[in-house]
Amino acid sequence: MEKYNWQFTAQFEQKKILVIGDLILDEYIEGDSTRLSPEAPVPVVDVQSDNWVLGGAANVAANVRALGAQVIFCSVIGADAEADRACAMAVEAGYSSDGLIQEKERKTLVKTRVLADGHPLARIDRGDDTPISVISQQRLIQQVQRHFGACDGIIVADYHKGVITPAIIDCLCNLIRKQPKFVAIDSKRLTLFREMEPTLVKPNYPEALQLLGYERGAKDRRALLERCGAELYHKTRAHWSVLTLDKEGSLWFEKGKLAFHIGAIPVVSPHVCGAGDTFISACTLGLLAGADAKRAAAMATAAATVAIEKETVSLCTRLELLAKLDNEQKLVTSLKHLREIRGYYKSMGRRIVFTNGCFDILHSGHVNYLRQAKRLGDVLIVGVNDDESIRRLKGSERPINGISDRLSVLAGLGCVDHLVVFGCVQDDTPTTLINVLEPDVFVKGGDYQLSELPEAKLVESLGGRVELIPLTANRSTTQLIRRIYEHTHDKSAIV
């Protein structure tokens, strides 16, 4: 049976990723600007907020952690106030700062962006991007050697800011030669990592042009790069070369041969800074979790979309990723699947709402009902009677729409998180589902009385509560079918 997106992402927490690269702090100073300075013809910004986020390789580590995996992050920073801030932010992001080596004579990298009324005015860069000292280099090598064996995969996030030196690359090559690992590389200097024969490299369009030695691009960027697979493989020796093209999606090459193209998800006002960090994090975890390349590509694309929809933080959590992916993960295919979903949401402290019904011809009453049900918790799971169950309950002429059509329409509702089909000759109630799911809230329509619901006592015995939601007046499938029949009959009489 095919795995669903949530099953792959559930495995993320079992993975440990070693991230190595340049730590950068991103500062966003935002405010209003209504006048020019009398000192020079430049805008005066009245500061309203000053936000700091992890950038560079630290943002890769933060994304890996947000997606649920364990992270070991190794880098070299200064011994200054910004370094203290970076260490605190690493802990806040959910991973240890023990791998951050402080170098006394070094200044931590900071990129400060000044925005007025949401529009960027300036970027101010501070810190050292020269190669780290020999002592720091040796300490970093020791950290990498210490953690390498216990990791499932390695991400090298090289921003050419001094951390990834030839000695660090040699160290990784030696370790990989002795103990092969999944290795993902994000770097403007991909040829330096050729000896590693990486699992994955991820150049963006300008980096791909530089790698291939092209002085300028072309109007049709995708067509230009589709012909370059063999050359990419020669220069990188990567199993997967993934060329990201912003709004044009990404091209995937397997050992130099074009495998597929995946389109981007449109975003009205994208904030692209850091999206590549999110992309490579999700892509790495997807492949390590056993997803095929197309599935991993879809995950990475969805995660990057979540990141660029945010104004400052380029971060995607596991739940945000699941929410962004298409609707296939909504269908729960077995009781085991349902039990695992329950455990997942309960571990996240999410309140589960459950309801059930036939939902034969979806109408505004159904939609209003489901929206109100979702507001009673965090996750709405809907049990749907199968076709035979509806025939037993409603008669031989029902359902009007078969189960696949009903599921397809329900899956299109944003308020519905999961769907599960039920019904059998012995029991057409959702009792079995409730026993497995143990919902916090069980919802039914206001046309029921608690005494009429055999499930009510079960829900309460499991620690949940029952909520009755008033139905929208004059809205029911039976009435809708009657009106359609009457309308059709009247028209036939006129003809």
Image (cartoon, rainbow, N blue to C red):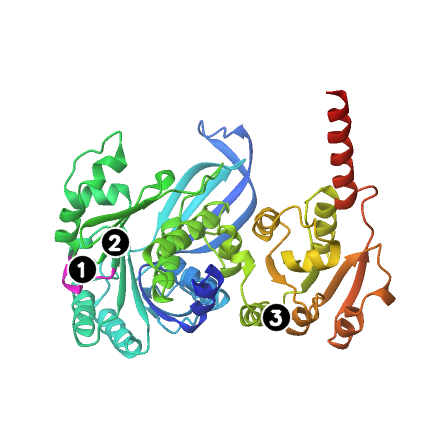
Q: Amino acid at mark 1?
A: Phe
In this image, 49 relative to 111: left or right? right
Q: Amino acid at mark 3?
A: Lys
Q: Nearer the viewer, mark 2 or mark 3?
A: 3
Magenta highlight on residue 344 = no
Q: Is residue 359 visible?
A: yes
Q: Position of residue 45 (x, y in %)?
A: 52, 37
Please rate how many residues cluster around mark 1, counting C-alpha atoms within 10 Å: few if below 14, some from 14 to 19, many from 20: many
Please rate how many residues cluster around mark 2, counting C-alpha atoms within 10 Å: few if below 14, some from 14 to 19, many from 20: many
Please name the predominant secondary structure of the magenta segment in the image: helix
In this image, 95 relative to 374: left or right? left
Q: Quadrant of residue 76?
A: bottom left
* Label 2 vs 3, first from the N-terminus: 2
**Vertical comparison of 75 with 48: above or below:** below
Determine whether label 2 and label 3 are within 8 Å by CB: no
The residue sitting at 42% across, 47% down in the picture is 112
Magenta stretch, residue numbers: 192-199
Q: Quadrant of residue 421?
A: bottom right
Q: Position of residue 11 (x, y in %)?
A: 44, 69
User: Is label 2 in a helix, a strand or a loop?
Assistant: strand
Report the front residue among 468 and 134.
Answer: 468
The residue sitting at 80% across, 73% down in the picture is 457
How far apart marks 1 and 2 lie (CA) works out to: 9 Å
Which part of the image, by quadrant, shows the N terminus?
bottom left
Determine whether label 1 and label 2 are within 8 Å by CB: yes
User: Is label 3 in a helix, a strand or a loop?
Assistant: helix
**Vertical comparison of 158 with 92: above or below:** above
Residue that mark 2 sits on: 187
Residue that mark 1 sits on: 193
